[in-house]
Image: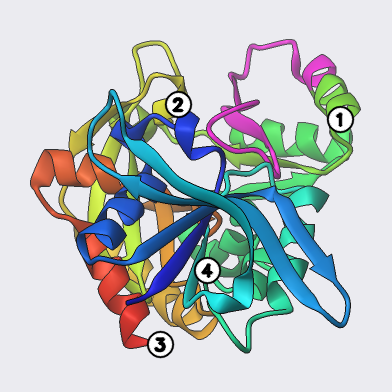
Amino acid sequence: MLKIALQMDAIETIDIRGDSSFALALEAAARGYNIFVYHPDNLAFTPGVGLTAKGAWVDVKDDINHHVNIIREERIDLTDLDVILMRQDPPFDMHYITATYMLETIMDKVKVVNHPTSVRNAPEKLVATLFHELMPPTLITSNIDQIKTFRSEHKDIIVKPLYGNGGRGIFHLKPEDTNLSSLIETMLLIDRSPLMVQRYLPAVTNGDKRVIMIDGEAVGAVNRVPPKGEARSNLHVGGKAVKSDLDDHDFRIAEAIGPFLKEKELLFCGIDVIGGYLTEINVTSPTGLREIKQLSGLDLAVSIWDSITAKL
């Protein structure tokens, strides 16, 4: 029987109603796999010896009142596992990057999904620019003059942290807004990383579609509709999940980026599509599995585990 681990944020505190890591754990349990969970803070690498993690073997069930049962806590050698799912949430910072370096040391003995080297080399907003022809007009810079020039050309713009997540720190600036300079100065004081600036897409009021990619193929989608008066559609900030089918725009984008994802062993990804434009490629801990199953009955966790086990 397979022994699998989820490298993730504390499983005891997650909201299972919208947690894709939990969806993957549930399917692993249904298959009879032994499940170990640990936080990346509990990794320990000893050169010449190996990589270990302190965590717990668990049972999981789809019960919002009692979703996890701790069987046994211990520190294990991660090479004793068959599969590790790297599922902790961003921010994508040096803490995150260091975890990818550590997991790389055991790649010859354990299947890690997604491939840690590719995760590290594919920051979610930056990697999308490899397919810039599919994106809205975009600028990445810390230079205020460049941002002002971009705004003069495109009028309505979105400004967001390059390494942010969950809709945090995203601003919609209309042409008459006088806060641009102050906003940029403040954002750069918080984080010296460049900002991503994009032309605002009015179609976001109809939703920001999350398309799930498994081994380079588009397999399902959920639309996330922002609350009235809000430019952000992320579920974490009040966006509403709405049933959605894949359309021609989704398949066109998936066909373009699918071979890249497959080549880089980015097996489970989520791409964000607004009005037919690609805005991000999520490779760290994509979400949407629970919402898709709830709205359409499609259990993509099954397909993900089928794909993983076929590669063992």
Magenta stretch: includes residue 26:
no
* Residue bearing the label numbered 3: 312
How packed is label 3: few (under 14 Cα within 10 Å), some, or many (20 or more)? few
Check disc 2 and report its element: helix, strand or loop: helix
Tell which circle, 3 or 2, labels the residue nearer the N-terminal end: 2
- Res. 201 image quadrant: top left
Q: Camera-side residue: 113 or 180?
A: 113
At horizontal 45% and vertical 26% (from top left) the residue drawn is 236
Between the residue at mark 1 and the residue at mark 2, the CA separation in whole angstroms equals 24 Å
| Labelled disc at residue 114 | 4
Please determine whether, in this image, residue 281 is positioned above or below residue 261: above
Q: Nearer the viewer, mark 1 or mark 3?
A: 3
Check disc 4 and report its element: helix, strand or loop: loop
Between the residue at mark 2 and the residue at mark 4, the CA separation in whole angstroms equals 23 Å
At horizontal 47% and vertical 73% (from top left) the residue drawn is 83
**Image-based side of 149 in relation to 307, left or right:** right
How packed is label 1: few (under 14 Cα within 10 Å), some, or many (20 or more)? some
Tell which circle, 1 or 4, labels the residue nearer the N-terminal end: 4
Q: Position of residue 199 (x, y in %)?
A: 56, 38
How packed is label 2: few (under 14 Cα within 10 Å), some, or many (20 or more)? few
Q: Which residues are magenta?
A: 155-183
* Residue bearing the label numbered 1: 188
Q: Mark 2: which amino acid? A: His
Q: Camera-side residue: 87 or 69?
A: 69
Q: Mark 4: which amino acid? A: Asn
